Image (spheres, helix red, strand yellow):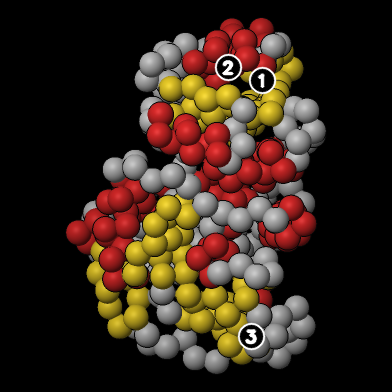
Amino acid sequence: MKAIIIEKPGGLDKLTLVDRDDPGAPGKGEIRVRLHASSLNFHDYAVAKGMIPTANGRIPMADGAGIVEEVGEGVTEFAAGDKVVSCFFPDWLTGGPTISDFSKTPGDGTDGYAREAVVTPWSWFTHAPKGWSHEEAATITTAGLTAWRALVVDGGLKAGDTVLLLGTGGVSIYALQIAKAMGARVAITSSSDAKLERAKELGADYTINYREDETWGRTAAQWAGEGIDHVVEVGGPGTLAQSIRACRTGGHIALIGILTGRGGEVPTINLMAKQARLQGLIVGSRENQIDFVKALEATGIRPVIDKSFPLAEIAEAFRFEEAGKHFGKICLKI
């Protein structure tokens, strides 16, 4: 089968298309999945670039969607022909967080889904939403579930709440769609007026060009009245101070990204004064994903896909992501 591997020390020029042995038939408790799509996330980019070191010859990509070709003995949740989507943390099935690293995450600690077929335990996948394409389904694993957990599982989002989203990448656009489907009001930032116009078309109530407004946190708080109920913080140290400024007293900040760096100064006095809840999170559990799929089917939300690339052009897909011109998700066709 065809697969992409990352050669040491990493870098987009180190992504190589190779032939690998077919994984064969599934054993007891396993399923064989013919993969048809993946989608790009910052984590995948960091692994590919060598920013997150991994084993030589690692197969990248945490997101995988496809069709069950065969089930092993004892598997009852899936049948041949089912459309499925992978889980980011294969061993986190239910309950609260149990994992704080990426040692079991496909595409990082273990081989990922930039390949044609896999054989895995059945619990590594869930059903995909009915009627979705493989590319659409592949956006669920990381970006979609992160947005769902940030707003619904951890945030307890309810109708009438206000939400602030940073940028127009995959997580933020999914969060916009989830928030609007649940009756929330949404403000969103970008450095591109054209992207802000597209966000308005998806239902954004208020837009801020952060290049033109350096105190965008204050602006968002004023728009909301008494501050924002939920901030989905994807930037990290370079944006956290403004996110705290935007948040209402007693509000919720979901810290999910490191786009501006891995560490930096936190204005602790401001966070304390706001009595806000700053909660770090990494994606979610299999149970969270099952609930999210049900919500997607109930609400009719469909992901926004900017562009798709063939598997062999994975390096070009990452360069497109690196340029920051995308709106929503970038996918791979396998």
**Residue 257, visible in the rendered structure:** no
Q: What is the C-alpha distance between the residues marked 3 and 1?
A: 44 Å
Rendered image quadrant of residue 40:
bottom left
Foreground mark, 3 or 2? 2
- Residue drawn at x 70%, y 85% is 79
Q: What is the C-alpha distance between the residues marked 3 and 2?
A: 47 Å
Label 3 crowd (10 A; few <14 / some 14-19 / many >=20): few
Quarter of the image that includes the C terminus: bottom left
- Residue drawn at x 37%, y 85% is 1
Helix, strand or loop status at disc 2: helix
Helix, strand or loop status at disc 3: loop
**Residue 148, visible in the rendered structure:** yes
Residue 68 spot, x, y in % from top left: 60, 82
Q: What is the C-alpha distance between the residues marked 1 and 2?
A: 7 Å
Q: Are marks 1 and 2 in contact (CB under 8 Å)?
A: yes
Residue 66 is labelled as: none
According to the image, label 3 marks what residue? 81
Residue flagged by tag 3: what amino acid is it? Gly
Residue 228 is labelled as: 1
Residue flagged by tag 2: what amino acid is it? Ala
Whether residue 332 sits left or right of residue 119 in the image: it is left
Residue 129 spot, x, y in % from top left: 67, 66
Label 2 crowd (10 A; few <14 / some 14-19 / many >=20): many
| Of pointers 1 and 2, the one earlier in the residue sequence | 2
Q: Are marks 3 and 2 in contact (CB under 8 Å)?
A: no
Rendered image quadrant of residue 31:
bottom right
Residue flagged by tag 1: what amino acid is it? Ile
Residue 220 is labelled as: 2
